[in-house]
Image (cartoon, rainbow, N blue to C red):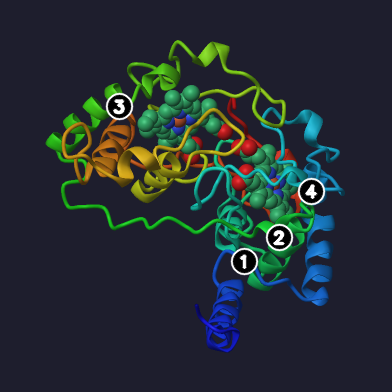
Amino acid sequence: MKSFESIVPGRRVALALLLVLSLAPGASAVADPETIAQGKRVYETQCAGCHGEQGNGKGAAADMLIVKPRDFTKGLYKFRSTPNGTLPTDADLYRTITKGVNRTSMPEWSLLPERERHAVVEYVKTFYPQWDERGAGSPITIPNPPATLLAPESVARGRELYEALDCGRCHGPTGLGDGPSAKTLEPDAWGNPQKPFNFTKGALKSGGAPQDVYRTFMTGLNGTAMPSYADVFDEPDGESIKPGDAWNLVSYILSLRQKAPGAVPPAVRPVAATAAEAVPQVKEQAP
Ligand code: HEC
Ligand code: HEC
């Protein structure tokens, strides 16, 4: 049996490891009070009108909106590069804020100075008190799309996967968003109606690039019926799922679009410098 002395060095290693882990991505460093204060100022002038002063999604404009602004107090985020059920990374929040959410009133905030965008990310996280304790999930790796993306064989294989995985149950046999389950979906986690996306038209909420589609079905959209398929694609068995199949599914999804793959119809998404500018410009489509 080992003496106490002989395990002490081991404990030191464990301590060092703990230190490293606490600085690893995922465990978010607590922002300094100045950044939080700046984020609060940005939030109260630009975001509270929709998301509410308390971050509960009940801003003055919320009643008028079809797709309701996010309630930040639940720690549930749709648009993430992190596994289902986990919190998004700062980079995910920064991306959503910078690019906005297509087909909804959520403006893109690319005109806000970068520092203010980073500060408001820190402030938004404070609405969910468990954030620092839980930390963000570890982002998935999104490889570069292969040269075969959108090639006819890739689209054909993607179609087989779409059928085998039963995406059509919600999104419909031809991707029109009219699958048999579409009408019976429970309200989302925030109590609002939800509707599977119609792949043939309209911009994807979190972007129409191949990587965006890949990210969406690999991580799912927390709080909605849209599941994560990471467990299906992460370990291809070589039979029902082959290596590279996730990109074949992306090929099929993009092939369903009436316009050029990934094309974003003009003037769907408001660009706003202030919330006051954002609301009257809103041109929403059904959720
Ligand atoms: C005109 C209303 C409006 C304004 C102003 C607005 N938002 Fe939003 N925001 C929305 C709506 C609506 C959604 C929900 C989209 C959805 O659920 O599909 C949303 C979603 C989000 C999300 C995505 C959450 C997720 O689930 O991944 C973030 C983050 C966000 N808003 C941050 C902000 C910040 C920060 C500001 C201010 C700089 C802001 N919003 C201003 C309407 C607004
Ligand atoms: C149980 C129902 C259900 C199933 C099954 C389902 N989805 Fe979805 N999906 C949804 C809902 C609901 C949304 C819309 C969520 C929203 O707009 O907030 C959605 C949205 C999407 C989006 C659009 C995201 C965006 O940025 O706008 C993509 C892409 C997608 N699903 C792909 C798939 C694929 C691929 C499959 C099969 C592998 C699949 N879905 C299976 C319910 C489902």
Label 3: which secondary element: helix
Query: Is there CB contact under 8 Å for labels 1 and 2?
Result: no
Judging depth in this view, the residue of 246 and 69 nearest the camera is 246
Q: Residue beneath label 2, please?
A: 133
Query: Is there CB contact under 8 Å for labels 4 and 3?
Result: no
Q: In this view, does 154 lie above or below 113?
A: above
Q: Is residue 215 above or below residue 11?
A: above
Q: Residue beneath label 3, please?
A: 162
Q: Which of the 4 quarters of the picture holds residue 159?
A: top left
**CA distance for labels 3 and 1:** 36 Å
Q: Residue beneath label 1, please?
A: 27
Query: Is there CB contact under 8 Å for labels 2 and 3?
Result: no
Q: Does the residue labelled 3 lie within 8 Å of ligand 2?
A: yes
Q: Residue beneath label 4, please?
A: 276
Judging depth in this view, the residue of 212 and 169 nearest the camera is 169
Query: Is there CB contact under 8 Å for labels 3 and 1?
Result: no
The answer to whether residue 263 is seen in the rendering is no
Q: Which amino acid does label 2 sit on?
A: Glu
Q: What residue type is labelled 1?
A: Ala
Question: Where residue 52 sits: x, y (%)?
Answer: 83, 45
Q: Which amino acid does label 4 sit on?
A: Ala
Q: Is mark 2 within 8 Å of ligand 1?
A: no
Disc 3: CA contacts within 10 A as few (<14), some (14-19) or many (>=20): many
Question: Where residue 24 sits: x, y (%)?
Answer: 55, 72
